[in-house]
Amino acid sequence: MNVVKIAIIGAGFSGLGAAIKLRQEGIDDFVILDRGQNFGGTWRDNTYPGAACDVPSHLYSYSFAPNPTWSRSFSEQPEIHRYINNVAAKNDLESYTRWNTEVTGIVWNEADGQWVITTSAGEYRANFVIAGVGPLCEPKLPDLKGIDDFAGEIFHSARWNHDYNLEGKRVAVIGTGASAIQIIPELAKKVGRLDVYQRTAAWVLPRLDRPYSNTESWAFKNIPGFQTAARAGIYASRELVSFGLTHAPGVLAPAKVLGKQNIARGISDRKLRAAVTPKWKVGCKRILLSNTYYPALNQANVDLVTDPIKEVTTTGIVTADGVARDVDAIVVATGFHVTDSPAFEHIIGKDGSSLAQVWESTGINAYKGTTVHGFPNLFLMVGPATGLGHTSIIYMIESQLNYLVDYLKLQRKYDIARVEVRSDVQHDYNVGIQKNLKSSVWETGGCASWYKDVFGNITTLWPGFTFRYRHITRKFDLAAYDTSSAAATGARTSAAPVTSHPATETVTS
Ligand code: N01
């Protein structure tokens, strides 16, 4: 058994960022547990052809680890993966990390004031857990009749089989989301025939992607402030979108025009143009970016199939109209278990209920997207209502890291052994979140999306400007929490109430 002060689950952007902050705070008694073999999380796992970020890299990177050598505006997966591993190496984090360590249970032991973490490589105990498992870690397979019997090659976009040669083959792609629209143009170049199964068309806007010129690269490296200014410019332009998404979907009307122009530029056939034109408002689902997706659909070797899938047979896919299309391989690009992540079942709180069970009755929610009543000494990274559709999630992660660091300072100052958010505070906070979401395009835009949980509440997205989130996470508000000191560890109630701290906050954007 291994005992540490803090266990970090996951070595992606969240876990790595947390580890760097711990070291900066002089904390060395921690471990990072990850089922993979190197840093990167979702950027390690998603190696499909065409994988790239749709937020420019000067913003989609840590503010405390700027990279002046990004080769282009929107980086591709290998470059982002390299960046993450370089940051880890510079901060000397390899020795803190246990690879090939799949976490199977995280159980709070009230008597000991510890989390008991079971893994594929033994047991760990920690006073504090930072869960950085990420919302995009568990591939979601479609519940299609017969899919298990398909005799050809089949894999999920996040588990790409690079050993299988798709050259010249007959291939089906199920899904037309963010991953699929990056995969399809790459496959269209090399497969014999490609069937694209679209359930709902997405708004796809032009992608302003280009390599940086030598002059720009030189300036990023050598002119003080140039990279920071670029980052600020990208941030500001993306925040404008958030106003439209949250408060005034009408503001996004020009995006619809751009989307329609993108369709018209890429597709010549009128029927095909109509088939890919969404019937819901821009922004209701994630706005996608591509210059190559529509031209790929326009290719002679590519077919868009809009009839619903009836079943998968041993040789291919049959649609509701009775047409059977045989294929050699199926690529499943159907997303991730976001609101029903298996990770929620593994985390068991003070009452013996899992996070999944608690959220089944209350709906998915947390205080400031980070702490949950009943789950002491647990920080969720990219927790409920912190996701974004328009800008860099790293900005939200860094906001949470500020909150974490401030907590660690207070923890030391007041010798806190146990911290648990008050249920009334968590409740009021989430009433505020849901109120702010009412006028959002995610609510009013006329689409179904995985942004919503089983109660129909949007539980994944942050409503409003991200600087509001930065503001409410700048200080750890102890008044929102029940705490007990090290001397009183084991007590269930607040043993060391702290009164001289900022009042609890609700959200207004
Ligand atoms: O998954 P998705 P994704 N039968 O859930 C369809 C991030 N990301 O992997 O819209 C048929 O968006 C589904 O159809 P519908 C980003 O946060 C980021 O593409 O539900 N079709 C949809 O078309 C993104 O939001 C980057 O009707 C089925 C598709 O599958 C998140 O990852 C790049 C189906 C799923 O789309 C997930 O993206 C890539 C079924 N049974 C991804 N079930 C960046 O650049 C689902 N679909 C940062």
Image (cartoon, helix red, strand yellow):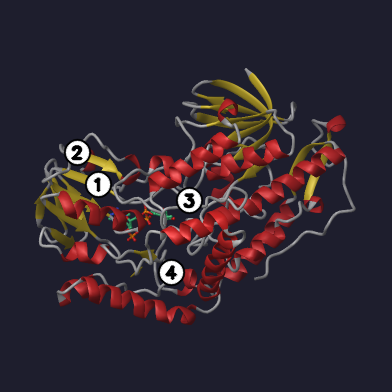
Badge 1 vs badge 2, beta-carbon distance below 8 Å: no
Would you call the spot at circle 3 few (<14 residues within 10 Å), some (14-19), or many (20 or more)?
some
Residue 155 image position (x, y, % from top left)? 27, 41
Q: CA distance from mark 1 to mark 3?
A: 33 Å
Residue at the spot of label 3: 69
Residue 100 image position (x, y, % from top left)? 46, 26
Q: Secondary structure at mark 4?
A: loop
Residue at the spot of label 2: 153
Q: CA distance from mark 3 to mark 4?
A: 34 Å
Give the residue type at disc 1: Val
Q: Earlier in the sequence, mark 3 or mark 2?
A: 3
Q: Earlier in the sequence, mark 3 or mark 4?
A: 3
Q: Secondary structure at mark 2?
A: strand
As displayed, is residue 371 above or below residue 90? below
Q: CA distance from mark 1 to mark 2?
A: 8 Å
Would you call the spot at circle 4 few (<14 residues within 10 Å), some (14-19), or many (20 or more)?
many
Would you call the spot at circle 2 few (<14 residues within 10 Å), some (14-19), or many (20 or more)?
some
- Mark count: 4
Residue 319 image position (x, y, % from top left)? 16, 57
